[in-house]
Image (cartoon, rainbow, N blue to C red):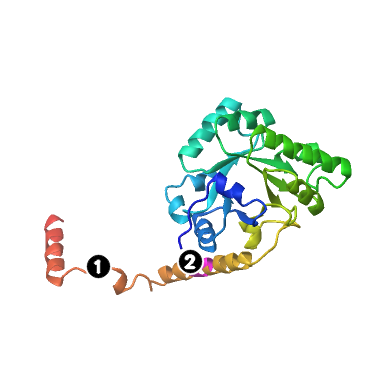
Amino acid sequence: MTRKLPTVADLQACKGQRQLTMLRYFSLEEAAAAEAAEIDIASVPDEILFHPEYRNAAPSVFSMTGQTHTECGSPDAYLRWCNQALERGADALYCSGSLATVEMLAREYVPIVGHVGLVPARATWTGGFRAVGKTADTAMRLYQEVKAYESAGAFAIELEVVPEEVATEISKRVNILIWSMGAGSGCDAQYLFSNDILGYTEGRIPRHAKVYRDFRAEYDRLQDERIAAFREFVADVQDRSFPQSEHVVKMEPNELEAFKEQLDAKS
């Protein structure tokens, strides 16, 4: 049975029924693999999501893109960008901007996903790149922030690097969808980056990620093969073993003789 592209309402109906799967991926090849694997949701760089072949690769993956609060400019500018993104195939938009911006976008019927917990673009306010909500007071602030996003009209939030127990309790008490990145299994979706899953992350792999394949070793092997092939090409050119007869076009002998005669006449 062919999957259909889910709507926001379809995702909301899954709350408390089943956990969804979510990826951040970076190429059309990864998009096609996500489609084949029946991934539910994807966060996609806009240059990939807006590619004319994207929906051929991932026709039934609920796909969002977005900008951080440092990129989006004024609320009006961000609204224009969001509307253009929806027209070009986005199913939802990520926004780490203010709640006032979220509310304005939601009033214009833009499906908005917020971000709570360790928000990289706002990490300086929560103590840097570390877990958020490990005390009762900070956990309560997380709950209040999630409720504020819900009140502002966002339909989902990414909850990043938050104690599992805190995320579970929050998720049980709100209607907004909670997408877990390092926040445990008590949320509505599990979210990982494709580069972590496939093992080609540069630098340290986050604690919350799981590596399923070693693409880095394969990429290194392929690079070694590229270099070897290029070196063989250089050697073949230098010793004149390339090109050979099968690589070139030949002229009929009589035409060649006629050509030479014409050249000699011009000399």
Snapshot quadrant of residue 243: bottom left
Q: Position of residue 134 (x, y in %)?
A: 85, 47
Horizontal and vertical percent position of residue 94: 61, 40
> Is 229 one of the magenta-colored residues?
yes
Q: Which residues are magenta?
A: 226-230
Q: Is residue 45 visible?
A: no
Q: Earlier in the sequence, mark 2 or mark 1?
A: 2
In front here: 148 or 42?
148
Q: Residue at x 12, y 70 (%)?
A: 254
- Residue type at mark 2 is Phe
Using residue 174 as the reference point, say whether residue 65 is left or right of it. Answer: left
- Horizontal side of residue 54 vs 97, given as left or right: left
Q: Main secondary structure of the magenta part?
A: helix
For the residue marked with disc 1, what is the amino acid? Val
Q: Which residue position is annotated with label 1?
A: 249
Place of residue 154 in the rendered image (x, y in percent of width and height, measured from the top left): 64, 37
Quadrant that contains the C terminus: bottom left
Q: Is residue 56 visible?
A: yes
- On the image, numbered disc 2 is attached to which residue? 230
Q: Is residue 228 magenta?
A: yes
Against 264, residue 136 (above or below) is above
Q: Nearer the viewer, residue 26 or 151?
A: 151
- Give the answer, above or below, for where 177 lies relative to 192: above
Q: Secondary structure at mark 1?
A: loop
